[in-house]
Image (cartoon, helix red, strand yellow):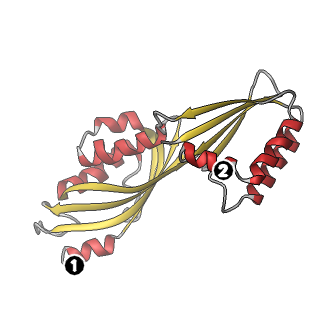
């Protein structure tokens, strides 16, 4: 179970605190078990900060705390604070990255299930697509996405296996394996009934909770060879 430690503190010396954190990261490279950190400053109090430090588990957090650099950093951190920092230890019981949820709706609800109403909800009006097989921009806009996904759905019964997904900032990148059965005409190729596969990578960029842009890279030549071209 993922574990998060929350550190709540006051300081007028944040530049020094920031430098301390950078030194700690450099000194513990390859040994620390921290997977993610986030620091927020209170808008209503310029000296009030909250750090969120994520670990794979409570046990890994305890292992990290036993590093000599961790104890030394804590002592130096306290010296930079106005008063003693407050700590809260959290076992994560629910973890959702909302941008991932939007991206996955395109894979599952739209592409696999064919629920095109989801496009109006999840895709921006000015959506731009960068698809390696679309050299004329036919996939741009909501209607463009309907047209592109409709072409694939008319040609194949298919499913995605999302093997890895990474979200950072306003982008979500998904590595996937795709498998389908060729049921309809595709790129001038009559239905073959063949079972085909390919792998690919999709990056989606969001604005205001909607998909503004995407990039699709996949083994199109390998797919065409499987279909007999």
Q: Quadrant of the C terminus?
A: bottom left
Label at residue 119? none
- In the rendered image, residue 10, in percent from the top left (x then y), is placed at 82, 28
Q: What's the residue at 32%, 75% (across, down)?
A: 221
Q: How many marks?
A: 2
Q: Residue at label 2?
A: 64
Percent of width and height locating residue 66: 69, 50
At label 1, counting other C-alpha atoms closer than 10 Å, the crowd grade (few under 14, some 14-19, many 20 or more) is: few
48 horizontally vs 34: left or right: right
Using the numbered discs, state the Cα–Cα distance from disc 2 to disc 1 in whole angstroms: 55 Å
Say few, some or many: other residues with alpha carbon within 10 Å of mark 2 (under 14 / 14 to 19 / 20 or more): some
- Whole-percent x and y of residue 20? 83, 48
Label 1 near label 2: C-beta < 8 Å?
no
Assign a secondary structure to mark 2.
helix
- Look at 77% across and 21% down and name the residue there: 44
State which quadrant residue 195 falls in.
bottom left
Mark 1 residue element: loop
Q: In the rendered image, which residue does mark 1 sit on?
A: 229
2 or 1: tag closer to the N-terminus:
2
């Amino acid at each position: 179970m993922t574990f998060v430690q929350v550190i709540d503190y006051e300081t007028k010396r944040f530049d020094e605190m920031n430098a301390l954190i950078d030194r700690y990261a450099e000194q513990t490279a390859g040994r620390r078990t921290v997977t993610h950190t986030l620091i927020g400053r209170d808008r209503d109090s310029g000296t009030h900060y909250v750090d969120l430090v994520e670990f794979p588990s409570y046990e890994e957090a305890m292992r990290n705390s036993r590093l000599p650099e961790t104890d030394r950093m804590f002592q130096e951190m306290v010296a930079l604070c106005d008063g003693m920092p407050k700590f809260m230890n959290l076992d994560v019981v629910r973890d959702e990255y909302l941008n991932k949820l939007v991206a996955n709706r395109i894979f599952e609800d739209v592409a696999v299930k064919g629920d095109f109403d989801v496009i109006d909800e999840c895709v921006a009006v000015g959506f731009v697509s960068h698809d390696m097989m679309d050299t004329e921009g036919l996939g741009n806009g909501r209607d463009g996405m309907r047209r592109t996904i409709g072409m694939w759905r008319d040609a194949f019964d298919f499913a995605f296996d999302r093997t890895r997904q990474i979200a950072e900032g306003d982008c979500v990148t998904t590595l996937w394996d795709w498998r389908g059965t060729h049921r309809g005409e595709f790129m001038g190729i009559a239905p073959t009934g063949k079972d085909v596969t390919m792998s690919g990578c999709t990056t989606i960029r969001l604005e205001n909770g909607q998909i503004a842009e995407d990039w699709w890279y996949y083994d199109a030549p390998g797919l065409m060879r499987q279909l007999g071209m």
